[in-house]
């Protein structure tokens, strides 16, 4: 430690006046409510040392540029982001952003333009990855957070104590509207709860949007009638412009779906955060489903430049989405790990959650608001839960677990996740079943029943042929299962 301190002293001496204005390694109480805190892994790219590079990052991501300018004022200097901590061993730098920098009334797009904007392109870094962020309660008051949550969907579906079982219609693209709706019906009739459009579904000429909506409604009505169970469809409303996005939302809302039976899916990375927050603010009574297609460019573990799955997920909760894909922790087909994906999932599920570097309390009540905190405790003590107590904090956001999953991976994933409070969507895992979608859905339901009864799927499959056929089909290449068990074990060990 002593060595590190003397090294840091040298680094501080190496700063020029411009850089000095963006470093304060003696910052008193960075958690005083004035700052959004961020931790980056930073490897300098050019001639600068890590502290000089960190100062340039803090400058470029707050008030500065690459030279000290004469137009600075004493107030503008108060808005400087500050490097306030370092870990030279791990190439980590902590930066405090005065959150008054950001657009008022809660704008996630603006924050990300600051803290993962230009700096991802500056020459002075060869690695710059935003690993975790911390929001002070006073700042959270400006943000919507989720409105319609998984709890509301559970109430609508009357599904408790297990994951919501979903699918994505496959092939990803190319079905006509009626063919698409047929597959929806088959999944729902087979016992599934939730169907989503795939991430590129839009208004393709072979599957006109309005026809798709109409036929899905017919399919849903039929399935609800026959199964006497409620169903949900998540419609992709991503579009070229907001007018068209809203038009698609209104088309769905005017197609006769009852409240709770539809969700709006948005490709949040490619459509953008303004689209995400527009949906959240326009439709507080609808489940807003954030699909993260494209996130890999920022989040893949081998990418030195970008941000973590945890950071993406925390901003999605801040923006107010009801659910976001958080990955299968390596159990499915996408790159991921428990350390990344499960931390992200827990980070958006709970009121208080441990991230990679920060413990986040999603309360909107600033620490110093002692009377209000006392009042809240009294309320809770007498179990007076106000109908809408979102003023207290940012509501939960639901992990959506998808990507290469099939019924044989449900239990192993739940063991890695540690809870069942999520939606899972399986595409090939249902539609590749040798007997088709309806049976594929039943196999998924049976795998979940087995889990709930504490019976292995192999045992349960002895009396449930749909599941048996699914297991035979999806485990014909054994290694997949062993790999999953290895992941589950590794989580146990940690
Ligand atoms: C899954 C999926 C989802 C991915 C997204 C796909 O299909 O529909 O978009 O899960 O990944 O298109 O691949 P399968 P993530 O179930 O057939 O794999 O959830 O990691 O964002
Ligand atoms: Mg997809
Ligand atoms: Mg307040």
Image (tube, grey):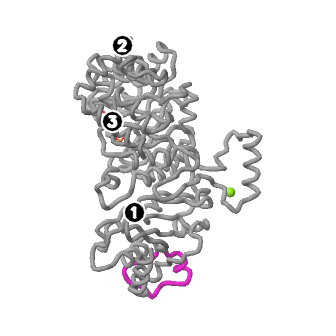
**Foreground pick, 38 / 494:** 494
**Residue 484, which numbered label?**
3
**Residue 462, which numbered label?**
2
SS at circle 1: loop
From where the camera sits, is residue 201 visible? no
Q: Which residues are magenta?
A: 63-80
**Viewer-side label of 1, 2:** 2
Q: Earlier in the sequence, mark 3 or mark 2?
A: 2
**Foreground pick, 242 / 263:** 263
Residue under the point 56% across and 42% down: 284
Question: Within the image, what quadrant is residue 482 found in?
Answer: top left
Q: Position of residue 155 (x, y in %)?
A: 58, 29
Image height of 20 relative to 277, above or below? below
Contact, CB < 8 Å: mark 1 with mark 2?
no
SS at circle 3: helix
Q: Earlier in the sequence, mark 1 or mark 2?
A: 1
């Amino acid at each position: 430690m002593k060595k590190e301190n003397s090294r840091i002293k040298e680094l501080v001496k190496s700063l020029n006046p411009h850089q000095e204005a963006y470093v304060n390694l003696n910052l008193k109480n960075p958690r005083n409510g004035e700052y959004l805190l961020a931790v980056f892994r930073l490897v300098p790219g050019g001639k600068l040392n890590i502290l000089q590079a960190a100062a340039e990052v803090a400058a470029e991501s707050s008030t500065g540029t690459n030279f000290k300018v004469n137009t600075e004022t004493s107030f503008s200097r108060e808005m400087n982001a500050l490097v306030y901590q370092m870990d030279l061993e791990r190439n980590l730098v902590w930066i405090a952003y005065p959150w008054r920098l950001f657009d008022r009334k809660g704008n996630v797009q603006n924050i990300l333009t600051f803290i993962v904007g230009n700096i991802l392109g500056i020459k002075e870094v060869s690695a710059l990855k935003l690993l975790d962020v911390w929001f002070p309660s006073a700042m959270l008051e400006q943000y919507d957070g989720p409105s319609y949550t998984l709890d509301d969907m559970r109430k609508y579906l009357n599904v408790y104590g297990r994951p919501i079982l979903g699918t994505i219609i496959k092939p990803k693209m190319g079905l006509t509207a009626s063919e698409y709706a047929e597959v929806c019906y088959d999944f729902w009739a087979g016992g599934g709860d939730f169907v989503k459009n795939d991430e590129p579904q839009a208004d393709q000429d072979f599957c006109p949007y309005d026809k798709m909506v109409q036929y899905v409604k017919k399919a849903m009505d039929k399935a609800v009638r026959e199964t006497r169970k409620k169903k949900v469809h998540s419609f992709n409303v991503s579009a070229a412009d907001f007018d068209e996005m809203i038009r698609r939302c209104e088309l769905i809302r005017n197609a006769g779906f009852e409240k709770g039976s539809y969700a709006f899916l948005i490709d949040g990375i490619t459509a953008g955060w303004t689209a995400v927050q527009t949906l959240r603010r326009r439709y507080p009574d609808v489940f807003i489903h954030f699909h993260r297609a494209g996130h890999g460019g920022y989040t893949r573990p081998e990418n030195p430049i970008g941000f973590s799955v945890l950071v993406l997920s925390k901003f999605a909760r801040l923006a107010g989405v009801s659910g976001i894909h958080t990955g299968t922790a390596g159990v499915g087909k996408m790159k991921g790990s428990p350390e990344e994906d499960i931390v992200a999932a827990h980070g958006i599920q709970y009121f208080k959650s441990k991230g990679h570097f920060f413990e986040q309390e999603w309360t909107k009540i600033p620490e110093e608001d002692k009377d209000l905190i006392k009042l809240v405790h009294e309320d809770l003590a007498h179990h007076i839960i106000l109908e809408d107590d979102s003023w207290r904090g940012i509501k939960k956001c639901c992990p959506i677990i998808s990507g290469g999953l099939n019924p044989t991976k449900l239990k192993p994933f739940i063991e890695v996740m540690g809870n069942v409070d999520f939606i899972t969507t399986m595409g090939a895992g249902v539609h590749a079943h040798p007997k088709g979608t309806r049976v594929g859905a039943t196999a998924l339901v049976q795998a979940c029943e087995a889990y709930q009864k504490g019976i292995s799927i192999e045992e349960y499959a002895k009396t449930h042929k749909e599941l048996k056929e699914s297991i035979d089909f999806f485990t014909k290449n054994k290694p997949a299962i062993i790999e999953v068990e290895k992941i589950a074990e590794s989580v146990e060990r940690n």
